[in-house]
């Protein structure tokens, strides 16, 4: 039996700590396994009982006279290690641990978790948890979970697998899915992901050909590399990965830290990470349930327009749908002109606006069928979304049946149709869905799912980059900590970034022989000087050598008065650079998703407006160009109101170069602030930058 | 019978154009009235039939041997006028017109609508529509509508009235409300609002003491004054007005124009208008249904904190709830420390984060009850929201019953409790609601409703302002069109705005005798010069009288070359002003909500970031201060990163003064751009402004 089978379709299951008190959490897995008809062998382990729920109980997993595929350890935190050691000796393949009180709790818990990992790794156990509510696979009726929702009689099987960091949420998805007619194939509660994470499990489940896609409920990302591998492979195999992530707000981020033991990451970085690896993030919780059927249309629209034509039997309802779609950036297409003319010839008026308003011709079977049929067969049509008014509830013959008939009689090349009934109309929704027309319960989830379908973009290609040996050598020869500006600029220049002409001079140097192109800037150089402006260690617009000399001595004198302990290494004299705008490029390692590169417009307002773009590093020039495109503060440099255009292509190249710092694990962070962007075609020049080494 | 009764509880109803073909829309009102048990007299009017659906049909409403309270005109557009004239002669009190093809269609339709209005006004008819799907009142079983959803057997009665610009949506609200256990009292489809609008109907319904609040479904605002009067009175009477407005996106705005014949307004202005008159705008459609029960708690929390304490039996679910609340600006309160200590003494651990996580102590009746009871009785607690995990579905004894018991045993001063079950758990929701615990079906609607409750702010006080007679005189003496800068500044000064020292001089004046404080600015003054900078008609930073003389002649010469047709009236010489920031103040008349005042930070980035604040004019200084507070671009002037603070109080005063232009209907618009904001306490000075008169 291989690992995948042991996880979702084991033949032998040990329930360690199973209770015979049916009010207890620990009695649930046995009860659910039996009630859902699991046909494998169930072995309760409980040293205090001979029988549990009609089955013989064992003192230890080692006493079971069979090789165990899957063990669910449900004992208290203090007894987990011993139970796991038993499993290791018994060569159990897959183990899930229920108890909490590990890394999410405190330092002692972290030590305990490290011990768990050590035992599992040594024994080769595929270990879920701690803090895992177990595993359910509907095909094998393997409902090995403590989640109360699985008491349901309805354990229907679908084609998507749920992988959740919250154990409770697997129950929520089962329950809400049942009500919505959406069923999942497999549910896995990953808990603390001490050994195996969401990505590992996803990668394993990719080997299950029955599974067509994945739903992730996430509170953090613990293994961005593993998750990325899984998501990229899933994309290649045409299996959508849909994620709902808690933690858009600072409050929820803070909570994730205390609740999951996770680190606080940059939520923009996490969003960019998801997008870059091909994970579709939904905003509305309901969209988790409704997105799979919509994303299954990906192939059908591959060669079609990505615009949406909205047909409606309710003006107000149609307007609501268009409003929500447009708010999410979905483009609305009007009815193709030839279709409009053809319908008009049949005496069917659909109005002149972008909404194809069937009410104008009266909601009738023939009208609706003609409208849908003609629109979906037109080559310019991308996706058709029908907002169905009150008739959907009690008069399905008027607007629902014609949709179904139009779809069933459509050619193989026709555009897909989606339906949003305004009233509560379960039966109409079921009929539409049975005919391959996905439907939605809320207008917000509808718009969320449709926007996923229209945006559906591949993962960012993996960037094949290397750091030049010269850069690596410079980095390894530097001391750790924040490098001074000269050291920093040496490394950045080695990457290919441009600096103004600059000269380092001793604090007491004779400047008379220096050939400088004035005006210049003079800065004191010291590892201790991070905020040069605030500390009076920078002077700009120096016009000649006399001013330069004065500036240097004044700066030194002032600094020695106010910050007696700062050791100034040298003075850096730079020729002043003029451009049409400024930008900031940052490189850092996000505690959640790892190395990221950031770009922002220069100046205080970019900061106030939080106007920045972020992406996992390294990035290609093309990705950097997309990052720049997302920044509003660059509008002036894109020629807004006739302003002179800036060399944003050069900026993109710089972003890509800086992002290569990701490839050297000694680099903690770097910031170029500002980089001067010159007129189109004239490049970009770093004028101030710092690099920090671990 | 008064007008209110005639509208919602008529004794005699004429159905003009009623059909005997039950497949037709026009057969529905008769069928619904009979099936829902309306006890008044129903008189079908149809010249082609003697009997309609078992009742005698009349040729005309005038032939009916009874005085008609309510007539529903369902004939085609072309026959509406004649039918309405019959109603006028028959002295019908309330008329609703179904047909479309009026002002929303074209010019001919607008003329037809004007005729409708004329007849109705002359006859004193309270007229709904055209394009109205009718009226339903559940108490009188008066289901006089063509909306298909009213075929339902469930016509339960609630305490809120629905007033909708979309006829289809009254069916959506009935249907979705039924499913959700939320019932409305009255449904009114206002159609085109040719005679009576949402505000008129609301004001009338305010006389119905049974009605406790209002739901508005809006696609535009046609009578901002009438709607404001209604909403302000409703607020005073403690009756919430909850609005869902379509048209957040440009696409939907464009659609509203073609679909309702509405004007395109500024969506920010509409939002500000709603807030200013006390209308609670929901984001999520579901929140229309769920907000009433939540807003009914307004009185209960009047003297309490407006923060929310989130209790949960699911860590992931609790995090979701907190995330959505925090995203909407709701403040989360942790468990009060004394309660934490008291629970701890009972051996109940609730964690250390802001989420009161009951799972840590195990989800048990006693634990949950103790937690809820202690928290709601604490004086610092504002609102308690419980996210209930999987147990809500099949094990309500664990977490649902203790909430109900805690609430039922609570003191009269206890904080209110709301519940969000993560799984699909209808029975638990019904039990909670029956005990006065509002519940929610989606986390987004939950957060939307709770944010309405916590924000619940009174309408902006009506500003009692008057325009000085001197200002009025100046305005009336000006010619229409865009006034030149000197004319504009004269009017703005008369309002109390400050200008720099400035002198108007003839283009060929002798400047030698002028005593100016240099540097100065010189501008050519002409009504034709709107874009002075682009046309080279402004020079700044002029250092002395020689430079001034040269500047003027150069500007005149250049202008005469490039714009030979522009007549320059005078030259304006202004002493230059320095400040710590700039702002823009605008006054305009929004096509939807009427006079509005706008404030934005100066500069191109404020424009790029669409960072402005808008409010119906006139505004008080306090309101202007709140507007300023909403602008991110003023952060530097609020002392961001140690920058010098600006005199934002002076700016607020200027906004209030400019907003008084609303009081003179001759003023079309005005813009001060920029107004220089000086250091705190030093005022604000207009340096460039234009006023346009109708």
Image (cartoon, coloured by chain):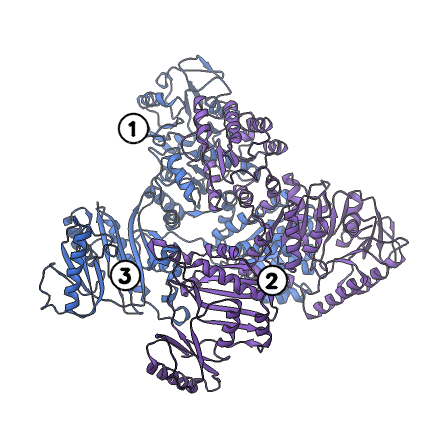
Chain colours: A blue, B purple
Mark 1 or 3: the one toward you? 3
Mark 1 or 2: the one toward you? 2
Q: Residues within 10 Å of mark 2 (few under 14, many from 20)?
A: many
Q: Is A638 placed left or right of A516 in the picture?
A: right
Q: Which residue is mark 2?
A: B592
Q: Is B132 placed left or right of B394 in the picture?
A: right
What chain is tagged by disc 1?
A
Label 1, label 2: how many angstroms apart (C-alpha)?
64 Å
The one of A656 and A56 positioned closer to us in this rendering: A656
Q: Position of residue B64 (x, y in %)?
A: 89, 55
Q: Is A436 placed left or right of B549 in the picture?
A: right
Which is more N-terminal, label 3 or label 1?
1
Q: Which residue is mark 3?
A: A675
Q: Position of residue B650 (x, y in %)?
A: 45, 60
Q: Which residue is mark 1?
A: A111
In what quadrant of the picture does the C terminus of chain B appear? bottom right
Q: Position of residue A476 (x, y in %)?
A: 16, 48
């Amino acid at each position: 039996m291989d690992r995948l089978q042991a996880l979702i379709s084991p033949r032998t299951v040990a329930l360690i700590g199973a209770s015979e008190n049916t009010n207890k959490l620990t009695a649930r897995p046995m009860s659910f396994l039996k009630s859902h008809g699991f046909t494998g062998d169930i072995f309760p382990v409980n040293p205090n009982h001979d029988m549990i729920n009609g089955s013989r109980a064992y003192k230890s997993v080692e006493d079971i006279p069979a090789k165990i595929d899957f063990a669910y350890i449900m004992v208290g935190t203090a007894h987990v290690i011993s139970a796991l050691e038993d499993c290791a000796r018994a060569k159990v393949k897959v183990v899930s641990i229920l108890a909490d009180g590990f890394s999410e709790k405190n330092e002692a818990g972290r030590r305990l978790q490290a011990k768990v990992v050590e035992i599992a790794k040594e024994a080769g156990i595929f270990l879920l948890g701690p803090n895992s509510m177990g595993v359910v696979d509907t095909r094998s009726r393997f409902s090995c979970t403590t989640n109360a929702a699985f008491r349901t009689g309805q354990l229907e099987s679908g084609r998507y697998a749920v992988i959740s960091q919250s154990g409770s949420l697997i129950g929520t998805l089962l329950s809400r899915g049942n009500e919505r007619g959406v069923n999942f194939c497999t549910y896995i509660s990953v808990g603390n992901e001490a050994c195996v994470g969401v990505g590992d499990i996803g990668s394993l489940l990719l080997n299950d050909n029955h599974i067509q896609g994945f739903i992730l409920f996430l509170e953090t990302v613990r293994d961005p590399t593993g998750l990325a591998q899984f998501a990229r492979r899933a994309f290649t195999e045409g299996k959508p990965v849909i994620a709902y992530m808690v933690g858009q707000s600072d409050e929820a981020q803070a909570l994730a830290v205390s609740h999951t033991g996770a680190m606080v990451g940059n939520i923009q970085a996490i969003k960019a990470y998801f997008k870059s690896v091909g994970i579709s993030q939904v905003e509305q919780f309901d969209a988790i349930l409704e997105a799979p059927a919509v994303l299954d249309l990906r192939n059908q629209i591959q060669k079609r327009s990505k615009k949406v034509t909205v047909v409606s039997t309710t003006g107000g309802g149609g307007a609501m749908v268009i409003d929500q779609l447009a708010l999410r950036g979905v483009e609305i297409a009007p009815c193709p002109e030839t279709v409009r003319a053809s319908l008009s010839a049949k005496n069917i008026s659909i109005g002149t606006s972008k909404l194809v308003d069937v009410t104008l011709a009266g909601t009738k079977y023939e009208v609706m069928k003609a409208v849908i049929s003609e629109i979906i067969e037109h080559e310019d049509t991308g996706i058709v979304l029908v907002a169905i008014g009150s008739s959907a509830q009690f008069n399905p013959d008027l607007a629902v049946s014609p949709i179904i008939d139009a779809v069933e009689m459509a050619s193989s090349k026709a555009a897909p149709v989606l339906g949003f009934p305004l009233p509560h109309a379960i039966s109409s929704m079921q009929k539409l869905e049975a005919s391959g027309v996905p439907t939605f319960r809320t207008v917000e989830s509808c718009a969320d799912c449709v926007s996923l379908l229209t945006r559906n973009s591949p993962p960012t290609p993996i960037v094949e980059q290397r750091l030049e040996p010269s850069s690596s050598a410079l980095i390894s020869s530097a001391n750790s900590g924040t490098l001074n500006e000269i050291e920093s600029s040496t490394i950045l220049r080695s990457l290919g970034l441009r600096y103004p002409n600059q000269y380092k001079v001793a604090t007491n140097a004779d400047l008379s022989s220096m050939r400088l192109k004035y005006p210049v800037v003079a800065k004191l150089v010291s590892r201790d000087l991070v905020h040069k402006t605030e500390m009076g260690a920078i002077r700009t617009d120096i016009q000649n050598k006399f001013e330069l000399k004065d500036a240097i001595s004044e700066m030194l004198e002032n600094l020695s008065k106010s910050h007696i302990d700062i050791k100034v290494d040298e003075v850096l004299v730079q020729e002043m650079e003029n451009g049409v705008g400024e930008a900031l490029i940052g490189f850092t390692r996000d505690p959640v998703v790892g190395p990221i590169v950031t770009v922002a417009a220069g100046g205080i307002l970019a900061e106030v407006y939080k106007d920045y773009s972020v992406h996992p590093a390294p990035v290609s020039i093309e990705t950097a160009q997309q990052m720049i495109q997302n920044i509003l503060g660059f509008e002036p440099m894109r020629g807004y109101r006739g302003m002179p255009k800036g060399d944003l292509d050069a900026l993109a190249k710089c972003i890509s170069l800086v992002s290569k710092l990701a490839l050297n694990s000694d680099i903690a962070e770097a910031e170029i602030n500002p980089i001067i962007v010159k007129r189109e075609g004239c490049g970009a020049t770093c004028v101030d930058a710092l690099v920090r080494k671990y």
